Image: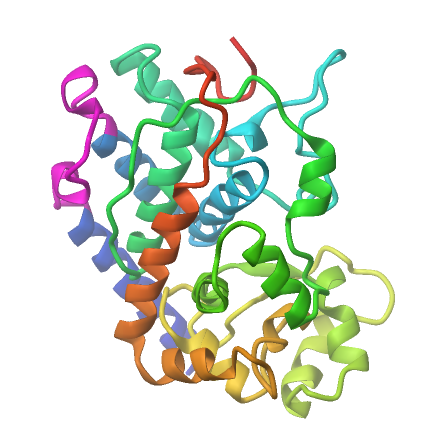
């Protein structure tokens, strides 16, 4: 029975992506500075994302997370994509990123296609923003207009990456503060956290919750322990939303109400918290979640990076 349900879910996802590919890129934004300089840019990004999601469904969540980890560190400037060199330290080895962020090869492939079409035109920062949106749409989530025209940074900050990105062990007060520091409301925080309806987490980030916390549904914790023992298996993965892991929907919030949040920071959003009412609203009203998530993503995509940046030829290195 489980295999049949999983297969049906995959077939629905494939059908959804196939349908979305038929939608022209022009319908994804009304503010497109690439309309003349690189008219196929948005379609190229979308096609690359959908191809990657069909190959591996988890990659949609990974591309969305790349954009988040980029924007929360000194703005949306693709600094997260820069590799370390002998004379340069990037952000990939920061605690929240190391052995955790993924999807770099997908970005490389899309960027290569863009450079073949129109060299030196589309920034890596814009690529990340559009890829995040297209990933959500490919997984059944909402559509929003991506503001374009970002520049790529010529610097990165390991220290800021270590301090600016909220931890999965954060309490709700710390989460509210971290998001407020970037100009987000508590409602924005909850809406953006809804991105955890897709993707997977490593055992090491939720082990303490399933073995030590009491505000967790007992059978849910028990089901996770074979794949996440007390010792070892740190990199074993579990879906952040076990009910509909390959669909972008509002099931994440229903899980929180049932004490089935995977990470400590997830469950902190519900259960006597100032954010309870937002969780309840989104659990009962998927349209409200989609609308508020889209608005929060537009706000996040507007976090300013360097105005004196460049258009990288290779997203991993400064020109």
In-image side of 232 versus 125 (left or right): right
Q: Is residue 281 magenta?
A: no
Tell me which segment is drawn in magenta: 21-41
Seen in the picture, residue 255 relative to 83 is either above or below; the reply is: below
Kindly identify the residue that appears in the image at 72 percent across and 22 percent down.
89
What is the tally of numbered marks visible in this picture?
0
The answer to which of 170 and 127 lies nearer the viewer is 170
**Magenta stretch: residue 28 in it?**
yes
- Quadrant of the rendered structure where residue 281 is? bottom left
Residue 77 vertical placement versus 23 (above, below): above
The residue drawn where x is 30% and y is 61% is 141
Question: What residue do we see at 24% from left, 54% from top?
Answer: 143
Q: Which of these two is toward me, 4 or 158?
A: 158
Structure colour scheme:
rainbow
Is residue 130 something that shows in the picture? Answer: yes
Q: Quadrant of the N terminus?
A: bottom left
Residue 2 seen in the figure: no
Out of 10 and 240, give the one closest to the viewer. Answer: 240
Residue 312: % across, % down = 45, 15
Looking at the image, which residue sits at the far right?
Answer: 231
Residue 161 placement, left or right of 76 = right
Q: Residue at x 50, y 29 (%)?
A: 78
Q: Is residue 215 above or below residue 181?
A: below
Residue 162: image x %, image y %? 72, 43
Question: Residue 242: x percent and y percent?
Answer: 51, 74
| 319 lies above or below 154 | above
Position of residue 123 in the picture relative to residue 23 (left or right): right
Residue 122 location, x and y as percent?
33, 21
């Amino acid at each position: 029975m489980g295999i049949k349900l999983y297969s049906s879910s995959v077939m629905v996802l494939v059908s959804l992506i196939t349908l979305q590919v038929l939608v022209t890129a022009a319908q994804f934004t009304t503010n497109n500075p690439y309309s003349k300089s690189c008219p196929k840019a948005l379609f190229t990004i979308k096609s690359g994302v959908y191809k990657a999601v069909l190959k591996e469904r988890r990659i949609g969540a990974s591309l969305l997370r790349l954009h988040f980890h980029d924007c929360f560190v000194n703005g949306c400037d693709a600094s997260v994509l820069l590799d370390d060199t002998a004379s340069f330290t990037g952000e990939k080895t920061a605690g929240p990123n190391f052995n955790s962020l993924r999807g770099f090869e997908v970005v490389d492939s899309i960027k290569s296609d863009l450079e073949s079409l129109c060299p030196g035109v589309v920034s890596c920062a814009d690529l990340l923003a559009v890829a995040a949106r297209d990933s959500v749409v490919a997984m059944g989530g909402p559509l929003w207009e991506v503001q374009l025209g970002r520049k790529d940074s010529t610097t990165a900050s390991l220290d800021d990456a270590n301090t600016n990105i909220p931890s999965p062990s954060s309490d709700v007060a710390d989460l509210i503060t971290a998001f407020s520091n970037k100009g987000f409301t508590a409602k924005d925080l909850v809406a953006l956290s809804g991105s955890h309806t897709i993707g997977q987490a490593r055992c090491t980030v939720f082990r303490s919750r399933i073995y030590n916390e009491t505000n967790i549904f007992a059978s849910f914790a028990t089901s996770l322990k074979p794949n996440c023992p007390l010792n070892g298996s740190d990199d074993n993965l579990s879906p952040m939303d076990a009910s509909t892991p390959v669909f972008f929907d509002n099931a994440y919030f229903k899980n929180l109400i049932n004490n089935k949040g995977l990470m400590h920071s997830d469950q902190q959003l519900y259960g006597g918290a100032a954010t309870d009412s937002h969780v309840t609203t989104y659990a009962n009203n998927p349209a409200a979640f989609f609308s508020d998530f889209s608005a929060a993503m537009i706000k996040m995509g507007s976090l300013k990076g360097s105005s004196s940046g460049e258009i990288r030829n290779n997203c991993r290195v400064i020109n």
